Image (tube, grey):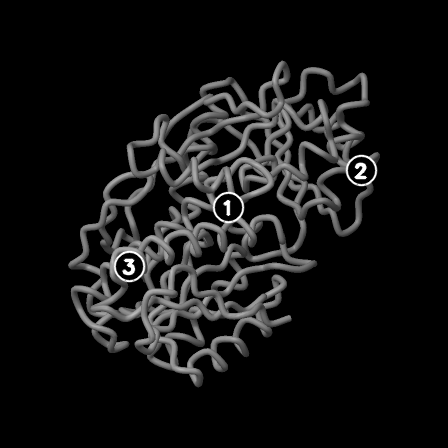
Amino acid sequence: MNTPTSTPGREHTDRPSVLIGVLVPLSRPGWAEAGRHVLAGLELAVRDANDAGGIGGRPLELLVRDTAADPQKAAAAVDELAELGVVALAGEYHSVVARAAAARADALGLPFLCSSAVLDALTDRPTERVARLAPAQSHGWRIYADFLLGAGHTRLAVAAQPSVYWASGTRVLRDHLAPHGGTVVELDMGSLTAADVCDALVDARATALLLLVGHPDPAVPIVRAVRSDPRLTDLLVGAPAGQPEFTDWADLLGDDGTAIPFLRYLPERLGPLGARVGKTLSEQLPEAPSFVAFEGYDTVTVLAAALRSHGTDRSGIAASWPHLAVEGTRGPIRFSRPPGIDVWQWAWPPVQVVDRDPRQPDRFRILHTG
C-alpha cells in the first residue's frame, strides 16, 4: 500500500516542493499503531516548518510508503522514492526493516535519518549517509539491565522469537548481567506454547521474564498465561522493546498489561517545545502520543535544519550530520560516532524504564532513568 503524498501547510506557496521520502509500518504484520504515531509526528513537524517559510520559501512535502514490516518492501520503496526525487529518507520503526532501508539508501547515495529503530548494526559498514535519533539497542538495553539488577533480578528468562533484533537484545542483557552473577535462560517461542513458558519459568526458578516477541501474538497470550498461573505471582514480566507503550496493549490486556516495565525515550519533563508538540499531537491522535510520535517530529525538525544550512543536495545533507545542533522536543540534538556504531548517532536521547500504573493504567510510572 502506498500512502498518499502528505503536504501539511503547503497552501501558502506554489513553488516546487522539497520532497522527503517516509518509510513507516501502516499495515500488518507491521506495528501499525507505532507507524501512525511516527507519521503523525513527521506531519506535524512538516506543517510547522512550512508555516515558518519552508526551505528557502519552498514547502516540504512527504512521500509516504507503508513498509508493513517487510524488509524487501522497504528496499523497493527506497528505490521508488529515489527515482521520484526525494532529497532524503525519514522514518521507520522496525529495526530489521530500517536496516534493509539503510543499506539500500547508502548504496544509492540517499541520506537517511532513521527515526525509531535501535539495532546497533543499522548498516554493515561505516557510512556518512545514515543518521539515527533513537538510542542504539546496546545503550538502552544496558540501562534496562541496570534497572533489573537494581530491583534484585539476576535469574532472567527471555521468551524470544528468531530475529536479529531479539538475538542482539539477549546478547546485551547476558553480557551486562554476567559480571554481576546474572543468568539468562532463553525460551524458544518457535516451539513453546504459553503454557509451556509457565512450566519452564518454574523449572528455571526465574524471577523475571522478558518478552522478546511480537505483539499481539505471542506476547498477549504469554502475559495472560503468566498472570493467571498461581506459581508465578511474584514473577516480574518485562518488555524492553516497548510493547506496553501503545494503547492496543492496554485494550487487549487490561489490568494484566500493567506493571510490565519497558523502555521509553522521553525526559522526565518536557520543555516548552515538547509540551506544545505533545498537546497538538494529543488533539490529532485518537490516543495520547507515544515517544515514537516525538521521534517523528524531531526527525523532520533535524532534516529541516540540515536543508536550511546545507542545501537540498543529497551529498550536502549527508555532510551536515556532524555539524547540526537542533533543539528537539526531548532536548538538544547533536550527532556523533559512538564506539561500535557505524552511523551518525544522537548520543544520547533520554532513556526511561517505565510501566503502566496498576491503579491508573493510562498513567506511566517512571521506575528508572539512564
Circles 1, 3 touching at the beta carbon (< 8 Å)? no
Quick check: marks 1 and 2 in contact, CB under 8 Å?
no
Task: Residue lying at the far front in this picture: please name it.
Answer: 12
Q: Which residue is mark 1?
A: 171
Q: Amino acid at mark 3?
A: Trp
Q: Position of residue 240 (x, y in %)?
A: 54, 37
Where is mark 2, residue-wise?
194
Which of the labelled discs sits on residue 117, or is there none? Answer: none
For the residue labelled by badge 1, is the local secondary structure a helix, a strand or a loop?
helix
Residue position for label 3: 344
Mark 2 nearby-residue class (10 Å; few <14, some 14–19, many ≥20): some
Q: Is residue 288 above or below residue 74?
A: above
Local SS, label 2: helix
Q: Earlier in the sequence, mark 1 or mark 3?
A: 1
Asked whether, in this view, residue 223 is left or right of residue 337, the answer is: right
Quarter of the image where one finds residue 184 = top right
Front disc: 1 or 2 = 2
Spatial distance from mark 3 to mark 2, Cα to Cα? 40 Å
Residue 28 seen: yes
User: Marks 2 and 3: in contact by CB < 8 Å?
Assistant: no
Q: In front: mark 3 or mark 2?
A: 3
The alpha-carbon separation of the residues under discs 1 and 3 comes to 23 Å
Of the two numbered discs 1 and 3 in the rendering, the one whose residue sits closer to the viewer: 3
The residue under label 2 is which amino acid type? Ala
Task: Tell me the quadrant of the picture where the N terminus can be found.
Answer: bottom right
**In whole angstroms, how far apart are the C-alphas of marks 1 and 2?**
23 Å
Q: Quadrant of the C terminus?
A: top left
Q: Residue furthest bottom?
A: 83
